[in-house]
Amino acid sequence: MAITRSEVIARAKSWVSAGVPYSQIRTFRGYRADCSGFVSYAWNLYPKPGHVTWTLPSRSYRISKSELKPGDIMLNTIKHVVLFAGWADSARTKYYAYEQRGGQGSIFWVVPYPYIGGDPSYHPRRFYDIVDDPSVNKAFSLFKKSFDGYINGLSEVPQRVKKTFAKSEVNEDGLSEASFLYGGPDGSTQWNFFSSGVGFKPIKVWQGKRGVFQISRAKMAMIDLNGDYIADTAYLYRNPDHTTSLWHFYSKNGHVSKTVKVWQSKPNAFEWSRSKIAAGDFNGDGLGDIAAFYKKSNARSLIWIFFTGRDGKVYPVKWWDSASDEFDWGRAKMTSGDYNGDGRTDLVFLYDYPSSKESAIWVFISKRSGGFYTYKWWSSNGSFETNRAKIVSGYFNDDNDADIAAFYKNPDGRSSVIVFYSNGEYAFAPKTLWSSQVKGFQWKKAKVMAGDYNGDTISDLAFLYEYPDGHTSLWTFINDATSFKPKIWWSSTRNGFKSKLAMPTG
């Protein structure tokens, strides 16, 4: 089966973005997680789990150094194989390589030609079925730009990249998607807006039956639920019989491949309307979990974690109880991220104190032994109001501590994006990175998401925005770590995709 060079590069890139550990036993997406399994995946070779180094010559032919192009390989049949991605200097003494390397896993870096130490036993080869295409250089250059700071001696993809894609990347191309549950007249649908790095293409990836899975009864979050490095979707759903269910919608090749009801409460035992949900890996086992912030009474709140097991089942555990301490469910806005960089997901609550006109950010740090440590990392002096903010988490600079972006409605009619940068050690530092003109980008008309939409390893923002004439646009605020650059990446026809019927990922 023919494959283009840009497809080979994109497939190789997806392993590097996922940070696949090296193994000659385990597999990733059906292919053995070693050097030849990696090349087999990149070339889309069958049968799985892939060829070995001494059988790759049966699927390729020898070429000269001058003929090398992205998607070819450098092969030593008894040692190792590397995927060639382009020359790193004009003298052609070193090259960019994608590699599945022992002790390091999936990496993208600079290698001296023909290989480390000048080893002459490595020779260039070309897959019989590879096809030239004009977009390969663009695909390679975009990814090279993304990792310019890491290619010299990169041993592992940054944690922020893994964490971002676990929540937002569904088609293995190394770019986040914007995903929505949509309440249309023929039943609810799930849409993924696939990023090209410069725009979005919407595709319907799931269709529900009319009246069976209603958007008004669903709460949505995305996370890698089965450890395949692809984001899946979880829905907490209110059933007509007063029970609550948790559904897992598993992703494959960018679409929903399977839907499974993994948990259901008894009638009136777990009330959907008393829950706010967020996704993450709260125990650091590589499987996504769902946190439910639950209103027990006006002043008492609980946090339940629905842990995903290796068997695909869900195991709910109460991880926190405010008990007699007042923590009012109605005053808190929740998001999730790894704010101290320890590999386990934490929770953040933007909390309102109406009597003192104070807003505070509480961070619930996940304990290795279970439960949370609770700390107040930031508080306002009355100049920041909780009810004027919509919050999301992401990695808005180049460290591995998650940050918070607040889309804020100013009293003067402007909207702003304020990033609260985590220092990983009990403090957030707020900085305004963008502000609109007065009434120029209205807070109430926008729904906000976070992801890495251009592949530069830093989180951007996406806003689904509704216009008075009935059309909707998806704005992308590209982040260069100092400011946001807004641009429309997609627009609907009039009344074609209505923002008011769309629920973004939580």
Image (cartoon, rainbow, N blue to C red):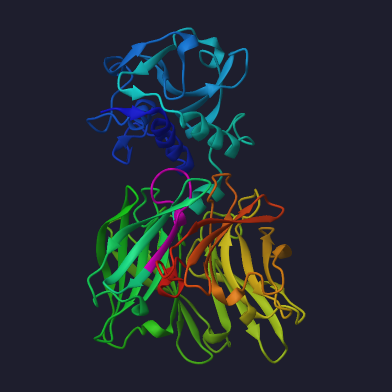
Q: For residue 175: magenta?
A: yes
In the displayed structure image, the side of residue 230 where residue 469 appears, left or right: right
Q: Is residue 330 above or below residue 225?
A: below
- In the rendered image, residue 286, in percent from the top left (x then y), is placed at 42, 52
Quadrant housing residue 212: bottom left
Q: Is residue 3 visible?
A: yes
Q: Is residue 21 visible?
A: no
Q: Residue at x 50, y 50 (%)?
A: 199
Q: Where are the magenta residues, as a range?
A: 167-181
- In the rendered image, residue 218, in percent from the top left (x then y), is placed at 36, 75
- Predominant secondary structure, magenta span: loop
- In the rendered image, residue 471, in percent from the top left (x then y), is placed at 47, 68
Q: Nearer the viewer, residue 484 or 170?
A: 484
Q: Residue at x 52, y 33 (%)?
A: 138
Q: For residue 429: magenta?
A: no
Q: Quadrant of the N terminus?
A: top left
